Amino acid sequence: MGLALASDDDGAVMEFHWCNKPFFNVMGFDESDVIGQRATIFVGPDMDQSAHLLTIDKLMRWEHFSVEVQLTKKNGEPVWVAMTWTPLTDPENGSRWWLCSLIELQARPSPNKNVLDFRSRSSVNDDLLTKYTEQVAHLESENRRLRSIAKAVTRDSNEDPLTGLSNRRHFEANVSVWIAALRNRGAAFAILYIDLDRFKAINDTLGHEAGDGLLIAVASMLKRITSNTDLVARLGGDEFVILRPLGESALKISSLADEIIREMSKPFEYDGKSVSCGASVGLAIADENTRNPDEIVGDADTALYHAKSTGRGRWSFFTAEMHAQSVATRHLAAELLVACKRKEFIPYFQPLVEASTGRIAGVEVLVRWSHPTRGLVPPKDFLDVAAQMGILAEIDAILFSRLREAVAYLDTARTEISRFAINVSAGRLSDSAILHDIRVSGINPKRLTVEILESVYLEQIHGATSWTIEELRELGVEVAVDDFGTGHASVQGLLQINPDVLKIDRQFVQPATESERARALIGSLIGIGKSLGLKVVAEGVENEAQARLARDLGCDILQGFYFGKPMAESELFKVLNETDGCLWCPISKVQHSELSMDILP
């Protein structure tokens, strides 16, 4: 027995939503093969055409009928069945259903026995009529039971099982209906796209039961603060949406967004504990120019991304500027895919200088995109989009392959470069593919330093990341923490990562020659590194005074435009040969003390 939701316009157009086990046994199909499919999946090449056409005609007329016909099992074997179709209607929402029952026949029926129309009883004798009357009474009872099943199936197909809100399917169907009404001089409406902040941290620290409890509480709150004319849905995960008629102005929309932010800023209670989460909201308005559901949902999603990127816990309206940025991002994403295919990413090198001698201590490897029309594109113009696309690993692999050639070329210079530092995101450290890239690069791992490029939050240092760091050390690779002191990498995080090198961000180095407080701060950061036995690098050195100060405060290595901007391997090769590897001539401490009054106010 199976239950299929039919089209209101054509009874022969339907999708199966439920079948019992005997139904699957007769046809040899699994549930995943049938649910969501039309009955035509059972029609094989051996089915009698007249029976097929007659069946379609009965379905289109919404008639109750039975047919004995040859169908095809999943494995291709033919099977003769008695198939009965009973039309049902849900009295609450008017949706129309078909109840299909199958009985497998042990032998092929006689040629004259094909279709029996329950609406045509002129050739049926009294006994048979009595029998069919009893069957109809039974079917009416079964009809009532199946109506409840149909109601449950309809609810399940439209409802999020955890929160009871509309699900993605129901939301998308309603957006289409609202847009169609809008084109027919209907009212404009708004979409509020809601994403919970720090939900993953709650799930990871308190468990999935706490996460589910939070989602249910959020759903309850959203239903409480919205009206009956709104549609509230959970799209999945921690994402919710609200459809709301625009009304006379957008003020009510922004007021609702304010209320959501305000309610989400309050702690939720779970298992006697207070849980703080927060939310960000993206808003977009559909008007007569809106073409399709994907467009307006995408606009709201873009506004949500803008809200999260500007600090979270806030809302943002979609603007024309965001639209232009969205179009540019999509264009950039398409170009990046082509760039990966053409391997257009190349390494550039910036010198690292020993603070005590001024000789080259190594280089930092920085990616550049060799664009066919725009020339060299710096990483700040494409890495964020590449990260969103999930292609950083592919770019890294291309860079490693190019780096192998560059290292081989630079090794022919008169001065050897002992170390090559490569930037790796914290996310990439969770991917063991970075180990594979290093192993197949052909570069001695003991000449490599891996710099953790992005913010390192404690919750990101999980088992996979720690394992990768240990494997890197086994290979002989150094580990450095970049941009230390910017508020992203904590001392506790340092202890967990246990790096070899600490790089102090340029925002502390550059003002230190002019500010006593800045000097005290950079001295403290250097002290932290030294207390942990780490080599300390000063980034962003742009003049002689900054270089001398960083050296005298205890930095081991200096880096910045003062010693050289990022350059191609051919330019670096030339610099190495012309300078014999000495990029700076540090003055003695005696000379420095004579000049200290000029340098340190």
Image (cartoon, rainbow, N blue to C red):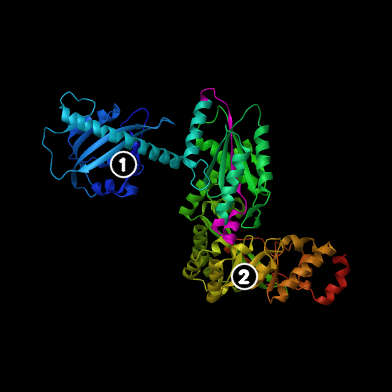
Counting from the top left corner in percent of width and height, residue 124 is at 16, 27
Q: Is residue 78 visible?
A: yes
- Which tag is nearer the camera, tag 2 or tag 1? 1
Quadrant of the image occupied by residue 117: top left
At label 2, the amino acid type is Ile
Q: Secondary structure at mark 1?
A: strand
Q: Local crowd at mark 2 within 10 Å, few (<14), some, or many (≥20)?
A: some
**In the picture provided, is 310 more to the left or to the right than 203?**
right
Counting from the top left corner in percent of width and height, residue 436 is at 47, 67
Q: Is residue 361 visible?
A: no
Q: Magenta span covers which residues?
A: 183-209
**In the picture provided, is 454 more to the left or to the right than 84?**
right
Quadrant of the image occupied by residue 529: bottom right
For the point 68% across and 70% down, the residue is 353
Using the image as rendered, state which of residue 264 and residue 179 is in the foreground: 264
Which of the labelled discs sits on residue 2, or is there none? 1
Counting from the top left corner in percent of width and height, residue 74 is at 25, 48
Q: Earlier in the sequence, mark 2 or mark 1?
A: 1
Residue with the mark numbered 2: 497
